[in-house]
Amino acid sequence: MLPVFLTAIGVGGATVFGAVIGFIFKKYSHKFSDIILSFAAGVMLAAAVFGLIMPSVEKGGKYGLIVTIAGIFTGAVCLNLFDKLVPHLHKLIGEDTEVHHNSHLNKVMLFVIAIAIHNLPEGIAAGVGFGSGDMSHAFLIAGGIALQNIPEGMVIIAPMLSAGVKPGKTFLCALFTGLVEVIGTFIGYFAVSISTAVLPFGLAFAGGTMLYVISDEIIPETHAHGNERGATYALLAGFCVMLVSDILLG
């Protein structure tokens, strides 16, 4: 239980750490943002495949492949439903406006809520990894999510400050998004710990949510500013880093 608790704090704390970096470097180029987010996407992709989806197939027994596919699509559909209620993450990432009116502030707050909602399944993914009992894969998933959370925490800061939100409240919002991930970690852990029968589906569900975020949010954002070539190589680099980590941990 202690590793789960420490990991939950670490995963959620990575967002806060990224927010602190965001305060230090309030202005950064789209190219920098695209490269670092793409690297994070590659890390998440490897973590989803090696840490969640493949173990789901292995633990599913006779119908493992069917259960895994069902879990992947269920996770994706659930996030798709969330996206109908809140704005996409890339709507305000890197926005460089100086307008301080209420309508923009409302958009920024919706942006924060969107990140918080997307952090929940990421936290669940980390918790499910520990619930599976495979500590090497669990740490791989948690490490991948934590690395992804750092740039995500960074991009929260600039839009909020430009909208006129005070630094203290901006930091509290970043802390809130990290706390959601901590809660998600415990939800995922206890859900699969209660019943091992749901473990293969739970692993695939968590993997599906991560694949959805990568494809629907991160990749379109990082390819929208003319930096797609660098973003592609950064994604490959992130994937390979996690591939090496998986082999070493295995």
Image (cartoon, rainbow, N blue to C red):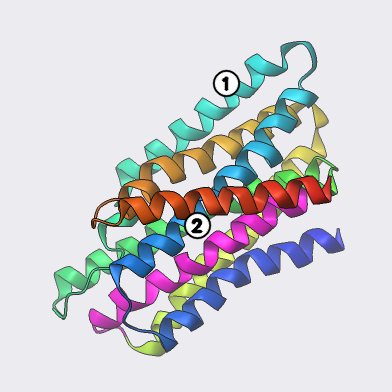
For mark 1, give the secondary structure. helix
The answer to whether residue 130 is seen in the rendering is no
Taking the image as shown, residue 242 lies to the left or right of residue 39, namely: right
Numbered label attached to residue 5: none
Taking the image as shown, residue 69 lies to the left or right of residue 80, namely: right
Quadrant that contains the C terminus: top right
Q: Nearer the viewer, residue 141 or 125?
A: 141
- Label 1 packing within 10 angstroms: few (<14), some (14-19), many (20+): some
Q: Give the labeled residue for mark 2.
A: 39
Residue 177 spot, x, y in % from top left: 50, 66
What residue sits 79% from the left and 25% below the top? 59
Q: Is residue 212 above or below residue 108?
A: above
Q: Give the labeled residue for mark 1.
A: 70
Taking the image as shown, residue 103 lies to the left or right of residue 20, namely: left
Q: Amino acid at mark 1?
A: Ala
Q: Nearer the viewer, residue 163 or 46?
A: 46
Q: Mark 2, mark 1: which one is toward the viewer?
A: 2
Residue range corresponding to the magenta coloring: 138-165
The answer to whether residue 19 is seen in the rendering is yes
Q: Is residue 17 above or below residue 140?
A: below
Asked whether 159 falls inside the magenta stretch, the response is yes
For mark 2, give the secondary structure. helix
Dominant secondary structure of the residues highlighted in magenta in the image: helix
Compare marks 2 and 1 and give the one earlier in the sequence.
2
What residue sits 52% from the left and 28% below the top? 74
